[in-house]
Image (cartoon, coloured by chain):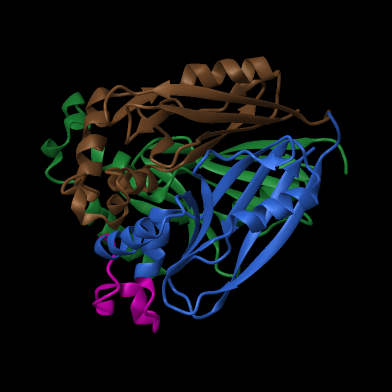
Chain colours: A blue, B green, C brown
Amino acid sequence: MENVKSLTEHLWFEVPQRRGFLNITETVEELVRKSAIKEGLCLVNAMHITASVYINDAENGLLHDYEVWLEKLAPHEPTSQYRHNGTGEDNADAHLKRQIMGREVVVAITKGQLDLGPWEQIYYGEFDGKRRKRVLVKIIGE
Amino acid sequence: MENVKSLTEHLWFEVPQRRGFLNITETVEELVRKSAIKEGLCLVNAMHITASVYINDAENGLLHDYEVWLEKLAPHEPTSQYRHNGTGEDNADAHLKRQIMGREVVVAITKGQLDLGPWEQIYYGEFDGKRRKRVLVKIIGE
Amino acid sequence: MENVKSLTEHLWFEVPQRRGFLNITETVEELVRKSAIKEGLCLVNAMHITASVYINDAENGLLHDYEVWLEKLAPHEPTSQYRHNGTGEDNADAHLKRQIMGREVVVAITKGQLDLGPWEQIYYGEFDGKRRKRVLVKIIGE
C-alpha cells in the first residue's frame, strides 16, 4: 500500500486506408512497465470520435468479419443517407461504427502487468483513416 | 504523488421527449475542478438502464443520424415484438439501444483537466424519457 | 484520504448452453465488502473474447429479447458466412455479439458499497459456452 502513481502517454497512428485494425497490446504493456505501477487500472481510449479501442482476438479472419459486419450495420454508402455528411464530411458511418466497437477499454494491472485473459488483445480500430490520430493511455495505481 | 482523493456527484435530468441527447461536458469539467484532483480517472455513468453516457460529436446532424440508426437497429414499434413489454412496460427497445450506445465513459484527468481529444464531448443519451433520471460522476486520483 | 488499496479476484463460470446470462451482482458486492475499500472504482470484465460483462435489468423477458436481438444482428448460422470460422471455430458470431454487449463495466464504490442505480444489475453474458471461463474483478481505491 503506497501513494498514488500515474502515467500519461499519447500514442499517434496514421492508418493509410479508410478503415483498419492495429494490435497495440505490446505498446500498452511497455507503458505499464515504464509506469512501475504494480496494482492499478489502465485506461486506453481513442481521442478521436471516428475510431475505437477494443479488446478481441488477433485473428485476421475475424478482423475481416468485423469489417463486413460493421459495413452491414452502418454502411458508408450512400453517404447522402446521413445528415451529418451535409456538413461536408463523408464519415457519419464511422461515428456509428465506433459506437458498436466502443471508445475505450479499462484493463486491470496486477503484479506489474496487464491482467489479460489468454486471447485478449488490445486493438485500435480506425473507421476514418488517412489522417494522424491519437490514443490516450492513462495508468493509475500504486 | 499524494494520497487518494475522490469526489462523488449525482446529476439529475428529465428529458421531456421519449428520446434525446444532452451535452454534459461542461458540467463534468466543473466537477473535475471542484474535486481538485490533478491526475486520475473520471467515471461518468447512467444510473438507469434505458439511458447511456457516451462520447462523440456535438453536431446536430449526427444526433439525428443516431436517432434514425438506433430506431433501425432496435425499433420501438411494434412494442409487442418484445417479451419485456409483456411486463406492462413499452421500453424494451430502450434497453437495447442503450447497449449499442453504452452505459459509461471513463475519462483521464491530466493536470487537473479532462484529457479529451479535440472533438470529444460527453453526452447523456435518453431512450425512455419523461421521467427524472440520474447520472453518476465519480472522480478518483491525487 | 488514505493510501491506495486494491483487490483482485477471478470468478469462474461454465454456462451449460451455447448462450446464457448470469446475474453476478451479489458476488461483486461481496468482493467490495471483502476489499474494505470505501471510495473507489470496481472494474468487472470478461477475460474471454466471446463473453460480456454488462449492466442492465434482471428481467427474464428482457434476457429473451437480448437473445433474439443479438441473433438478428449477428446470426450464428450459417457459420460459413464468417471467415473466422475457417479456422475450425464456429463462434465468430459470439465475437460480434460480445462487441454489442461490451467487455466490461466500471462501477463506482461509495461509502463501501457499489454505487448502483435502482435497477442496475451486473450480468455475465455468455455467447460461446460449454467451457470454463473467467471474469476479473479489480477494485482500487481507499
Q: Quadrant of the C terminus of chain C?
A: top right
Question: Is A128 placed above or below B42 here?
Answer: below
In this rendered view, identify the residue nearer to me: C22 or B59: C22
Where is residue A3? Give x, y as percent. Answer: 86, 36
Where is residue A41? Give x, y as percent. Answer: 67, 41
Quadrant housing residue B140: top right
Where is residue C91? Give x, y as percent. Answer: 30, 43
In this rendered view, identify the residue nearer to me: C60 or B19: C60
Seen at 30% across and 28% down, the residue is: C20
Seen at 43% across and 42% down, the residue is: C49
Quadrant housing residue C30: top right
Q: What residue span does the magenta drawing correspond to?
A: A73-92
Q: Quadrant of the N terminus of chain C?
A: top right
Q: Residue furthest right?
A: B1
Quadrant housing residue A81: bottom left
Q: Is residue C138 in the magenta section?
A: no
Q: Is residue B75 visible?
A: no
Seen at 32% across and 43% down, the residue is: C94
Q: Is residue C29 visible?
A: yes
Seen at 17% across and 30% down, the residue is: B83
Where is residue C104? Give x, y as percent. Answer: 49, 39
Instruction: Indicate left or right for A123 with B8 as reference.
Output: left
Q: Residue furthest front?
A: C88
